[in-house]
Image: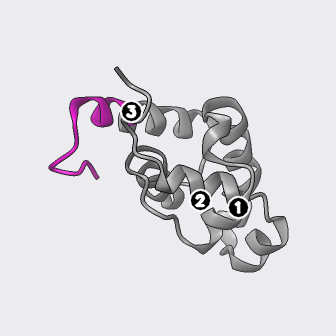
Amino acid sequence: MTNPHATAEQIVNESHYLERMAKHGVPEALREGLVRYLVHRVPPGHFLNAVLTNDLTGAVNRGDAESLGGLVNVVHFLVNEVTYMAWGSPITVRVWLERNEFEGRL
């Protein structure tokens, strides 16, 4: 999954998130999309976008059986492992995707 142009920090972050997703029982089919979103700021698919923007109706309407079965696990992962700046509303997700990952660093 690692992007060949990923920085060492991104690779560490990918590994960290994958480990934490496994701990929380996030379905494997959703892990790559979450990592791309969280680490590389790539827009997620429709189901994950609905979850990240706090759109329960959209998530239920877009999720397949495996995704819906892991919905609670995804939410637990987000609440416990992911910065509030990356999820919770459509505006938050849009800002996360638009923000340069190196902003604010010295």
Marks 3/1 in contact by CB < 8 Å: the verdict is no
Crowding at dot 3, Cα within 10 Å, few <14 / some 14-19 / many 20+, comes out as: some
Q: Name the residue under label 3.
A: 13
| Numbered mark located on residue 94 in the image | 2
Spot occupied by residue 38 in the image (x, y as percentages of width and height):
48, 46
Disc number lying in front (3 or 1): 1
The kind of residue on which mark 3 rests is: Asn
Closer to the camera in the image, 25 or 54: 54
Left or right, 42 with respect to 75, comes to left
The kind of residue on which mark 2 rests is: Arg
Q: Name the residue under label 1.
A: 90
Q: What is the secondary structure assignment of the residue under circle 1? A: helix
Picture residue at 68% right of the left edge, 37% below the top: 84
Indicate whether residue 3 is drawn in magenta: yes
Looking at the image, is 50 positioned above or below residue 23? below
Q: How far apart are marks 1 and 2 (CA)?
A: 6 Å
Crowding at dot 1, Cα within 10 Å, few <14 / some 14-19 / many 20+, comes out as: some
Indicate whether residue 7 is drawn in magenta: yes
Q: What stretch is highlighted in magenta?
A: 1-13
Marks 1/2 in contact by CB < 8 Å: the verdict is yes
Farthest-out residue, left: 4
Q: Quadrant of residue 101?
A: top left
Closer to the camera in the image, 88 or 47: 88
Mark 2 vs 3, N-terminal side: 3
The count of marks equals 3
Specify the quadrant that holds the C terminus. Answer: top left
Q: What is the secondary structure assignment of the residue under circle 2? A: helix
Left or right, 57 with respect to 21, comes to right
Picture residue at 22% right of the left edge, 30% below the top: 8
Looking at the image, is 51 positioned above or below residue 81? below
Picture residue at 52% right of the left edge, 64% below the top: 44
Spot occupied by residue 13 in the image (x, y as percentages of width and height):
39, 33
